[in-house]
Amino acid sequence: MSVSRHLPDYPILLAGVSTPVVKGLREMGLPVTELQDDLTYLTGYQSSRWNLLLVGSQKCFNEQELQILSRCRIPIIDLAEFNNKTGIGRTIPELAKKANSGVEQFNSQFVVQLKTRIQQSGGAWIRL
């Protein structure tokens, strides 16, 4: 599997991501921080090509949290896009409900999809 040679300056933030995915990302050497219930933590993160927030497919947010997400200055990737047939994640307003897709799994396909999305968000992913 690929791992990042240049680790992000800031951790990859996780909200409601499945335990196997969290464990897999950590085993790959990626710095991850799981956000708990308080999304106001996001307001302290500056815009950077490395910062991103991964949202688990079964995570949903209340109205106040959606407002925080709409002002969030880091890329948000809804992992539901990795599980559904269309390959499209939920929009910020749609994050009020759980995705119809299953729970994300950590496997080689997940890593490839994540690599692609990180590159699209401006990050670098280099095969060692």
Image (spheres, rainbow, N blue to C red):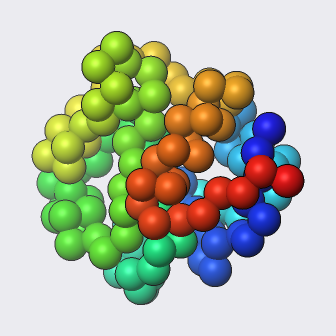
Q: Nearer the viewer, residue 62 or 89?
A: 89
Left or right of 15 on screen, residue 18:
right
Q: Position of residue 103 (x, y in %)?
A: 51, 23
Image quarter in which the N terminus is found: top right
Compared with 99, 14 (above or below) is below
In the rendered image, the residue lying farthest to the front is 127
Compared with 1, 115 (above or below) is below
Residue 73 location, quadrant? bottom left
Q: Position of residue 40 (x, y in %)?
A: 36, 74
Residue, x 68% and y 44% (percent of image)? 22
Left or right of 69 on screen, residue 58:
right
Task: Confirm whether residue 69 shows in the render.
Answer: yes
Residue 78 location, quadrant? top left
Residue, x 51% and y 54% (percent of image)? 118
Residue, x 64% and y 80% (percent of image)? 9
Residue 48 location, quadrant? bottom left
Left or right of 26 on screen, residue 105:
left
Q: Position of residue 89 (x, y in %)?
A: 30, 35
Q: Position of residue 23 (x, y in %)?
A: 76, 42
Residue, x 64% and y 72% (percent of image)? 8
Q: Nearer the viewer, residue 55 or 59?
A: 55
Compared with 119, 57 (above or below) is above
Left or right of 121 on screen, residue 19:
right
